[in-house]
Amino acid sequence: MTQAGRILQMRLDGLAEAMQRMLLDTAVSPVAREAADCASALFTAGGELLAMSEAIPLLLGALPGQVQALFARYPAEGMCEGDLFLANDPYSGGTHLPDIAVMLPVFAQGRLIGVAASLLHHQDIGGTRPGSVPPDATEIAQEGLRLPVMRAGADHRLSEEMRGLIAANSRVPQTVLADLDAQIAASLTAVRGLRRIVGDLGVDGFLHAAGELLDRGEAETLAALARLARAEARATDGLDPDAALGTSSVSVRLTVTPKGLSADFTGSSPQVPAPINCVASGPLSALLYAMLTLLPEGAPRNGGLLRCLRLVLPEASVVNAAPPAPVNARTNMVRAITSTVLAALAGMDPKRRPAANCGMAYVIAFSGQGPDGARFLATEIVAGGAGGGPDAPGAHGTSTDVGNARNTPVEIIEAELPIRMISAERRRGSGGAGRFPGGDGVRRVYEALSDGIAVSVRGERFQRVPEGSAGGRAPKPAAAQIRRAGGAVEILGPRSAVVLDRGDRLIVESCGGAGYGAA
Amino acid sequence: MTRLGVDVGARFIDMLAWGDGGVIGHAKEPVGGDLSEDVVAGLRGLGIAPGALAEIRIASTGFLNCLHDAQGGGLPQIGLIASAGFEDVAVLGRQDRLSLYDPVTRVATPEHLIDCVEGVSARMDAGGGEISPVDQGQVARIAEGFAARGITAVAVCLLHAHVDGRHERAVAEALSAAAPGLTVSLSHRIDPEPREFERTVSTVLDAWLRITALPALDALRARLRGAGFAGRWVWGDGRGVLTAAPTSLVPLIAGGPAASLRAAALAAEGDAVALDIGSRTTDIALVRGGAPALTEGGVLAGLPIRGGRVDLESLAIGGAQTVAGSRHTLDDALIAAGLMPGQSDCPTSEAAQLLGVASQALAEAITRHATRRNTDPTRAGLVLTGGAGALMGPGIAEALGLDHVLLPHLPAIAGAVGLAQAPRRSETITRIDAALDNVTADMLTAKGEGTVHARIAPRPRMPELEVAVDPERLDGLAVAYHAAYRARYAIAPQGPGHVTQLCTRADDLTGALARDMGEGEVAAPKGWRAVAIPGGTRLERVGG
């Protein structure tokens, strides 16, 4: 790649990262501001991924589908400067309903030069339960307001009609509208930044160079795939067995072809009438992340990579759900897909890779009425342990693979919710044993300070845990329970909806990472 | 009146003395075994007695170098006291990782600075209400345990201490009673802001630096006082300003680099990248509008460090560092290439190769730093300082495809120059924690000399913006905040506004060395010509 090309790609990467910082600076809800459950990226005027922020890969991988849906419905020639588009429909490029994409076409000298896009997990978008993540949903209509991609404003502002629609459907409208404004602020950062770049290169120079970057990204990806030691591998993983749903499995066959990488998920379980399904953005996020781990330092990370990816997704399956399947608790299915893909890739990659990460995260939503009568709603994300090896023990309580959410500080939780944290610790001994042990999971204990706090707990790896590598051992599975103030104990499963009264405690323990090498 | 700027580096102490008439003299004193002796020797060389100095302005890259060294272990560690149940805050961090696409998960925490963590049962709620009091006996037992382990410094970071620090103060008293002489750093004094991990990092750093980097500087001060120095002693901090009595050592970590980068910025023409090449590290910052860009925090020396400072990146590349797996250092190569006086057994051919590798690595770092801030380094200026800055300039310029570089006055002692030119900043901070509408004139008055600034967030616990306050026109604060927010974020604030502090600030340039030092004086290396410019020297490639 030429020096000018490298500089342009790095500037674009930096600009996507500036968008992300803007999101974190201006987002209001703790799940975005503290946990960083949001992502930003830049796209070409043709809708190809141009640059990504250093955000949660789980969300980054969802943006290309949203932008494709945008161009499918609104051809570039009909877009105007100042246009603003929204979407959250899982069945047209999205993820689950709380993740709303804001997309803003960027113009310079009257010409469309790209699209700035961001995705942010909003605190509530309606549905049967606060937080819009009902663990008992059996169809998507129960999960909240569904927005196919639509023009939602002009002059870089959300229209009053759209504000009214969202306000009428959310339990915390002011929070959602404020977070949407944060996404607009991020987009406007991109507008300013892209115009600065165009000021240096000219519109034609920029558009030409952007095309070359994508070509280079494609070439680097093909070269990285050609370096793999094996051209084919298979793996299977899945969620914990469920008495009602059975076992939801993910199967993948990765094959390197002259045109790139084929990921065939044939054999994965059919979709279920529970919200654990994911749509096509899930496998795309997993593959995008996995392939990015193959690229050498300095290679452009852009949509050139996606040109090399062919997904084969069985219709109406847990990895590619069809309407009206519910999808709100999709996160752990995407984690399972990622674990499966990484396991297959480990068999193809000549480099020594660490043992498997925990492959799960808790997503916990608290809601209720505060002492002042105002409704509160907050989500926090709890990571597990990283896999050990190949040269050091695994990290404790750290977001891994397609996750990169931060924890929510105890001081923020206690200041904003009627919750007292009793502890937040390493769950010692939960990482798999080995020469390089897996990182420990986390143990967090929450105590309710008022009655009627509704809690939604979504986790995974309660039974099915990853194997160790090279003689290392498996980690301890996750566990969760309620200890009532009166002493009764209730064991929780992977998807639970409970109500805490004053003095009740919720205890979550995340899974550790797998161990590497015989101890 | 004679003043002295002292920038303590890893191998050299840069010193600059000046008076009302300008520069009196400067020196680059090699670091020996005793910092105090070295500085006294430097002063002797300048013909200045300590008693003749009205002021000493000091900064040290020793803070940063110590942190780089700590990654390798072998340095003393501290004790940490946390709220019981939350002893792992320093290890767990914020749960995110350093590099997204590295299959090996790596995190940035201060764990390597900590020998032992103990929890105390004292607990407060978010409003500062006491849930359980300090158990003096428990703290005394912890102090004994620390003493048995040879721990001499302790960081105390209890939940919600930023709201009310009385538990931390009680813990400190109990520690002192049980183990007199223990150095104790309290989080509510070091970094009185919410979020326990970030505050823990600050407090651990303060305690750790007090037993690693600070003692030599304290000894120097005592030695100079003993030798008759009765003037003012001020520190250069990470923002590039001078402070008399810092509560925390954390702002001083980047004091040395910030002073150099501030001096470099004066030679910049428009947007530029400033590069200070020292013995141990090279520091990079972007310059806009004649000053280094600032940041509110980020990763420095492998740690997420909160607080305002120059937006700099510190690399482990320097004159005393070996290059590309060779046993030879960068200085060895510069000597062998005839660019630096001295003795070297590095073969000439290897020297050329090593200099090429180092130049390329620095060009890469410049590119990475500038592009992340949406600046094309091939279109921006490049300002070089530090012992090897001028010598490496042509090679780096070549690697970047530039036909010129800029050197400020006295580039080899830029840190001392930056200190000499910096303002003394006095700040009085009043924490108020009030809704914007409830800020009253009573809160704004009688806070000392200087301009008043308010820190305001849209809602509590969101990131804050600093807004200048006109005490006479308080009703204009909301309007000023809206304008500042829109200018920064391009949207209206998403809340009514919450004020967390008022700061009365005065920058005093009395006695500072004039920024206009005339034209530059650097000689040109072969193939380049030196053109004197107002801020220093412009080196132009001959035929470029």
Image (tube, rainbow, N blue to C red):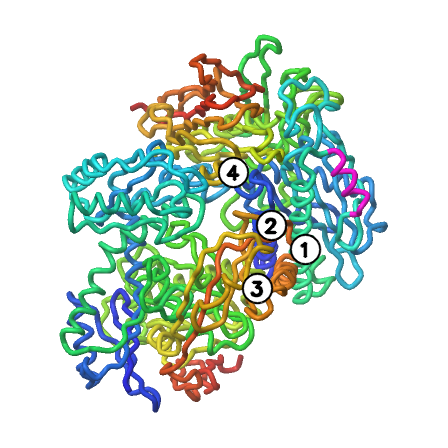
Res B491 label:
1
Residue A16 visible from this viewpoint: no
Q: Is residue B60 above or below residue A55?
A: below
Q: Residues within 10 Å of mark 1 (few under 14, many from 20)?
A: many
Could you say whether the residue bearing mark 1 is in a helix, strand or loop? loop
Q: Disc 2 marks which residue?
A: A26
In percent of the image, x 72 and y 50: which residue is there?
Answer: A115
Q: Residues within 10 Å of mark 4 (few under 14, many from 20)?
A: many
* Tag 2 and tag 1, C-beta contact below 8 Å: yes
Q: Is residue A433 above or below residue B286?
A: above
Give me the C-alpha separation between circle 1 and circle 3: 24 Å
Q: Residue B164 appears at what percent x and percent y?
A: 39, 46
Magenta region includes residue A390: no
Could you say whether the residue bearing mark 3 is in a helix, strand or loop? loop
Q: Are marks 2 and 1 on the same chain?
A: no
* Tag 4 and tag 3, C-beta contact below 8 Å: no
Could you say whether the residue bearing mark 4 is in a helix, strand or loop? loop
Q: Are marks 4 and 1 on the same chain?
A: no
Q: Disc 3 marks which residue?
A: B375
Looking at numbered disc 2 in the image, what kind of residue is underneath it? Answer: Thr
Looking at numbered disc 4 in the image, what kind of residue is underneath it? Answer: Asn
User: What range is drawn magenta here?
Assistant: A159-169
Question: Which quarter of the picture shows residue B332?
Answer: bottom left
Q: Nearer the viewer, mark 4 or mark 1?
A: 1
Give me the C-alpha separation between circle 4 and circle 3: 27 Å
